[in-house]
Amino acid sequence: MSMISNSIIPLNPPLEKGDLARNKDSFFPPFLKGGRGDYRFDLINFAKNFGPLVMVTFLLIAFLSGCYRGRPSDKPPIHLNPDMDHQPKYKSQAASAFFDNGATMQPPPEGTVARGWLKRDRAYYFGEDSTGEAIAQSPVAATQTGLQRGQERFNIYCSVCHSRIGDGQGIIVQRGYVPLPNFHSELIRSYPDGHIFKVISNGVRNMPGYAQQIPVEDRWLIVSYLRALQRSQNASIEDVPPEMRGQISHR
């Protein structure tokens, strides 16, 4: 009997001195280092024991918030990223407590003109003299660079209707639009430069005005290019330099 008892490993060995204190430490959470009386946080043990629980809780909160999203509410929305949605500025037609009349937009002081809007030079800005008559010649000097710029603007804004040679047979006319006048007719060739400038600016009949799309300088350059275009389609032998006339006659 003694031989059998000696061969059996006891399940609960007897406690020795100090064992009771160590067993009490086992009641402390494993993420506290050293057990009893030691409150240093152990992140690795915490993640090992509670990581799955934290992840499940986070996913549950995200799922529940997603189900609630889009539901009507009387409360203002929460702006996690304001993205400049609310700016401390005045907007057109908005009310204002600063001015006596309660309006944000105020009339300019009497006698003032906004910068860049004086336009005292009527010939340049409106193509007319002090009496309102169209000026005969463009106030912008014609240069090679200016003519190239005018050609570029003409091809962009004018050629779709008037064609690139100005005969009034642009692409939209070929597709059924109202026929347009020919720039090379005697009537249009006799128009003063100021009249053509005003037509480009304000429009005429079915043609809209292009003052908003084309700057003043470019409108005058278009006029200069149109004159060069008219000259090219109505040239005579007198327009050819004398030293080159012989070459033309042999063709």
Image (spheres, rainbow, N blue to C red):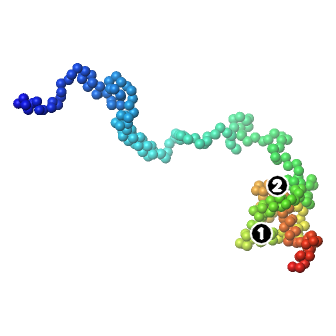
Q: Is residue 180 visible?
A: no
Name the residue furthest top: 17
Please tell me which residue is depicted at 7% across the width and 31% down the height of the picture. Answer: 3
Quarter where residue 188 is shown: bottom right
Image location of residue 241, percent across then percent down: 92, 70
Quarter where residue 31 is shown: top left
Considering depth in this image, is 218 or 106 the residue closer to the camera? 218
Amino acid type, callout 1: Ser
- Residue 188 sits above or below residue 30 on the image: below
Please tell me which residue is depicted at 61% across the width and 42% down the height of the picture. Answer: 84
Considering depth in this image, is 2 or 171 the residue closer to the camera? 2
Mark 1 vs mark 2, CA separation in Å: 22 Å
Image location of residue 205, percent across then percent down: 80, 64
Image location of residue 98, percent across then percent down: 71, 34
- Residue 67 sits above or below residue 36 on the image: below
Please tell me which residue is depicted at 35% across the width and 28% down the height of the picture. Answer: 33
Query: Where is mark 2, residue-wise?
Result: 216
- Mark 2 neighbour density, 10 Å: few (under 14) some (14–19) many (20 or more): some
Counting residues from the N terminus, which is met first, the one under dot 1 or under dot 2? 1
Q: Is residue 84 visible?
A: yes
Name the residue furthest left: 1
Amino acid type, callout 2: Val
Considering depth in this image, is 166 or 88 the residue closer to the camera? 166
- Residue 96 sits above or below residue 227 on the image: above
Quarter where residue 99 is shown: top right
Image location of residue 68, percent across then percent down: 45, 44
Secondary structure of the residue carrying tag 1 is loop
Instruction: Name the image quarter holding the C terminus.
Output: bottom right
Query: Where is mark 1, residue-wise?
Result: 163
Please tell me which residue is depicted at 27% across the width and 24% down the height of the picture. Answer: 22
Secondary structure of the residue carrying tag 2 is helix
- Residue 74 sits above or below residue 36 on the image: below
